[in-house]
Amino acid sequence: MNQKIEFSQFINNQKQLREQTGRLTADTVERVWGDMEAFPRLLDVVERFNLASGTLGGGSANALLIYAQCPGATRLGSFEDWKKEQAYIRKGEKGLRIYVRSPGKEDPKTHRMKYYYNVEHRFDISQTTARSQPEKVTWAEPVEIVKTSDFGVEYDPEIPDGVDAVYIPDLKMVRVRHGQTAEEMCFPLLTEFCHYEQHRLMGKTYERNPETNFVAYCGGYVLARRFGVSAESATFQREVFPEIPSGSIQEKCGAVKNLLSNIIRASGMAGQEIQMGITEMERNFGEYVSSPRYRPEEARAGALAV
């Protein structure tokens, strides 16, 4: 077949797929935004598909697509990927539509490779004959995962009831309310750690406001899930959600995807720092304290869609 005709068909197919995924994304945003039960499940997808070094299906757009099509998905691959592992797609299973990064041409001026995000179909491990490995996370003292990072933590007797911890930008320190157990203070510390990471990213423009509070809160939840810390204290009441544009669905989708991207970025940076601290602890103390799923050197390589 003529290459021009094949390319034209590919472009038309991509156009149709993008329209379908766009509608699916819009429907998902309408369904989960402000929902106290659905939104944490979306964050569970964010956690599973945005490890430190990246994994297929990562990014805010893909998080919404995976949640819409298979919220319990844990690992995606193509037909060829699973075949290489001697696993096969179960009869009747339909692939999930996600954005996959593909290399294009090198920019002649910058000599940097250009990438494109095409809509392709991938299958979750639950749709195949492959078996997932059980995961085990061991934490004797959960608060230690935050102590390994490069910012200060200290008790403050003047912090009032109802406030468990607060990040002080000028000091790059988190003040913690007295009287909490290590388990109780860990989620608040992870949340304030995400404020710290936002401060690093935003510099002088950083301030505590509904958006940075929301990003930090959701980032703390993602980190708690990632490192096996209790997130029982996390409650997604309606007032937790910041105001977003109420105009067109495109504006609303853009605002939600932007918030999800900020959550992915803040929790990702914090997660990398925590993991490096854990690795150092393992080296210094000669003991196994972390989950193999989150070892940077063993994380499955892949491209993050934006």
Image (cartoon, rainbow, N blue to C red):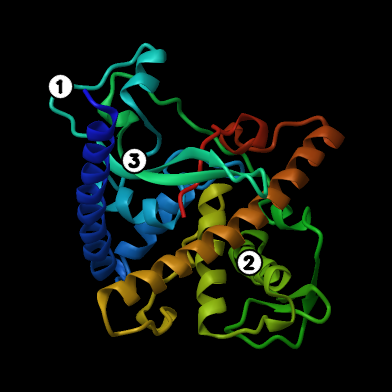
Q: Which residue is drawn at 41% across and 46% down?
A: 117
Picture quarter with the N terminus: top left
Label 1 environment density (alpha carbons within 10 Å; few <14, some 14–19, many ≥20): few
Q: Label 2 is placed on what type of residue? A: Cys
55 displayed left or right of 187: left
Q: Which residue is drawn at 60% across and 46% down?
A: 107
Could you say which quadrant of the image residue 74 lies in? top left
Q: Where residue 277 sits in the image (x, y, percent)?
A: 77, 46
Q: Residue 194 carries which label?
A: 2
**For marks 3 and 2 on the same chain, the one whose residue lies earlier in the sequence:** 3
Residue 218 vs residue 200, the one in the foreground: 200
Q: Label 1 is placed on what type of residue? A: Lys
In the rendered image of this protein, does residue 189 appear above or below residue 161? above
Q: Do the residues labelled 3 and 2 touch (CB within 8 Å)?
A: no
Q: Label 3 is placed on what type of residue? A: Ala
Q: Which mark is residue 91?
A: 1
Q: Name the residue under label 3.
A: 73
Residue 116 vs residue 71, the one in the foreground: 116
Judged from this view, the residue extending furthest toward the left is 92
